[in-house]
Image (spheres, rainbow, N blue to C red):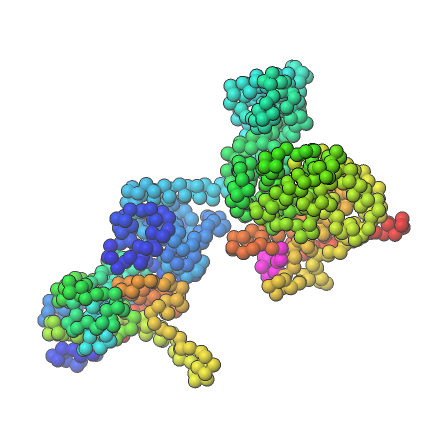
Amino acid sequence: MQAELIDIRNHLIQHAPFDDMPEELVNQLTASIEISYVRAGAQILETGQPSTCMYYLRSGAVEIFRRSGELYNRIGEGEIFGQFGLLMQRQVRFPARALEDSLLYRVPADTFHYLFENDENFADFVEIEDRSRLRSALSRREKSNALMTSRVTRLISRKTVSAPTTVRLQEAARIMTDNGVSALLLMDGEGDSERLTGIITDRDLRTRAVTEALPSETPVSDIMTEGLITIRTSSYIFEAMLTMLHNNVHHLPVMDGYEVRGVIALADIVKYESQSSLYLVSNIYHQQHVKGLKKISLDVRDSFVRMVNEDANSHMIGSAMAGIGRSFTQRLLELGEEKLGPPPVPYCFMALGSMARDEQLVVTDQDNAMILDDSFVPEEHDGYFLALAKFVSDGLSECGYTYCTGDIMATNPKWRQPLKVWRSYFTDWIENPKAEALLNSNIFFDLDGIYGRTEFAEELKTLISEKASNSQLFLTLMARNALNRTPPLGFFRTFVLEEDGKHQKTFNLKRRGTAPLSDLIRIHALACGSRAQNSFERLKSIGKTKLILEDDLGNLRDALEFISIVRIRHQALSLEAGEEPDNNVRPEDLSPFERSHLKDAFQVVSNAQKFLRFRYTSQATRHV
Amino acid sequence: MSESPAMPEAVKHLPWPEQYQALASSAKAPVLKAFYEAGCVPADTPVSEAPMVALDFETTGLEAEAHSIVSIGLVPFTLDAIQLGKAKHWVVRPRLPLHQASVTFHGITHADINKAPDLSEILEEVFASLNGRVPVVHFRHIERRFLNVALQYRLGEGIRFPVVDTMAIEAHLHPGRQPSFFKRLVGEKPLSIRLADSRTRYGLPHYAAHNALIDAIATAELLQAQIQHHFSPQTPIGDFWL
């Protein structure tokens, strides 16, 4: 190599895999390079062409496509492409096109193979990188489909290990060790009448038995988990994933009627789909410090974008994001309890709003509250709970869940109260409703206990489902509030635009799309006494009451899915472009297909709002 | 340009390939004879098929008669590929004293110069890369003139060849690059057609180092970009050379 080529060499050695390459090899590489300039839009590689070289992008940008024509990867300065064809069939597998005017360094096949033979690091890089990239590329669609189309039974690999509930702790631990399982199913009865009663896991042994120093002859029934969350053999893997995410359980017995067919563990799904958000969740539980959690939280957005690119639906994405948020909260509570000691009285930590609805996206603030046991004495106990709430809230903020601007957080003493006070809050909201107050308490009608005595939250759900359907005035005022936000449709189905902070004409997909929809779905759900929190689940329970026609329910479901997914894609695109995601969409950024369907979806919202007005407010005027 | 006094005026007006043929028989020095015998592609050759060589000299000044070549960088290339494996760079000992100012500019020191060969010692190597290729330069008044004077001094005869000048192409593309008097009044600056500035218009990267070889590579890249943007691979090479 001519010494004067140092400028070119120096560029190479700033980028992997050339940064660790022995000097002599880099020099040979440099001397083999052919430089070629291509204009934006030029086709660099076409499928089926013979592969003659690997490319190093010196400047510009290049897009790599799948054979289907779908964008697979975007190559930036200092990255390589085209190596796969050289490695495998010597035919171009992925067409490449210049996105910008680009300067390419071509590395001829001979040099490529020489480097491959003589530099293990280089070989690993091009091989592993490419195989995994390719694997994810080829199987991405298939795999995301697989999660949605494969049954959980596919994941059952181990035999089920069970024992009677009467066995002692030591014996249970021995059975688990002998069989190499992390969970033991506990059964009552025998033969045909044998029933699954509980489960005990490695984690239970550690946290409940060992830390409490229980005698080894304690019956497992003392520490087992009862009221098991199970899944049916007919369920899809993604349902298992959502169930685990939602309930924070790491083991799911798979049931065929009363018979246990097997147990699937979180690790099984992670193995099946290593990119899944469950992997992120399992990682959350391994963190010992807020710092570690903060580090992981940087992956949340990648996980989001990945799901979007894998064509997951809005329910899956919303649930996964909520599951991740819940896991952060739960882990922070565990860490908080480790730091502050065990709680002086039992409590339940409650998620509100989108997290409780399983409809969380990437831009979200924290909405939470604490329900304390009725034995709570403020003077004695509140110091502890305030400290714990603050620890969690600060931790969540570190992890990207910004503080709630409306101060709906457990750090606010008003939302850190014993169960009896919470009961009186809800009773007051429902039985003595005031429009203004309901506007602010709307968010409490999406609630979910996520840690501790979650049954406290269930009690509140019961109270709501019993009282709300009977209070016409409450429903009327809720409906009036829900009608404040209308979809952005004007005459002749034109979009009504607003100016955003950057002075662009946009409409807000949350404020004028998903929020009015979930508001009106909530009201119908409350009216029919549903305990569901998720909007799609709520639509299902509304369907059972015939409150809304089946066709209209289907339209609502489609509208919610469509507006949600456009909003989700909009945010994913912003993230990929390195911008801060928001909910403001410019009509010109949408495809004609999206524009037209979005108008249809908004029309559905608009019609549903008319029905809401008719159904609740007109009746109310008669009643009041 | 000054050339061999023996050369008949008519030869200078022949098209380049015929001119090379005529010069091949009249040239005395073997390197020059070989250079002309290697020939020149016909003017109607599509630029995509023309073998080219980007050439850059660093000199002690701008006057071929008063200043000397300090270094030579070159890289053979085509419209499709610049072959770094064939890139060459030489430092040569100037005939005339090195000016202190240009020493700092080139980064070539007196010590380098003292160790360097005279141009005559490396002529065969240099021509090995030039033969059969159309030289490409940025600003045509340096390389051709300096080489002509240097060869006259050393071989007793000069050299003639066409050059493709990327600066001339840029000048042609931006005829109105000097803003009008009024526009200059309101602060508009003339468009620069210097190598680095021209390159930025095509999205070409900035090179930190300055030596004859990097500048030759930079020139070759610029020509690739100019043709991709404003001409076509089929454009005859004769439309570019001067």
Residue at (32, 51) in percent of width and height: A107
| Residue A263 spot, x, y in % from top left | 58, 26
Quick check: B61 left or right of B179?
A: left
Residue at (88, 52) in percent of width and height: A621
- Write down the quadrant of residue A40 in the picture: bottom left
Q: Can residue A279 be seen in this view?
A: no
Residue B101 is covered by the magenta coloring: no
Residue at (80, 52) in percent of width and height: A435
Q: Nearer the viewer, residue B230 or A321?
A: A321
Q: What stretch is highlighted in magenta?
A: A583-592
| Residue A399 spot, x, y in % from top left | 57, 46
Q: Is residue B178 above or below residue A390?
A: below
Residue at (65, 20) in percent of width and height: A221
Q: In which quarter of the image is the N terminus of chain A?
A: bottom left
Q: Nearer the viewer, residue A487 or B38?
A: A487
Quick check: B49 left or right of A321?
A: left
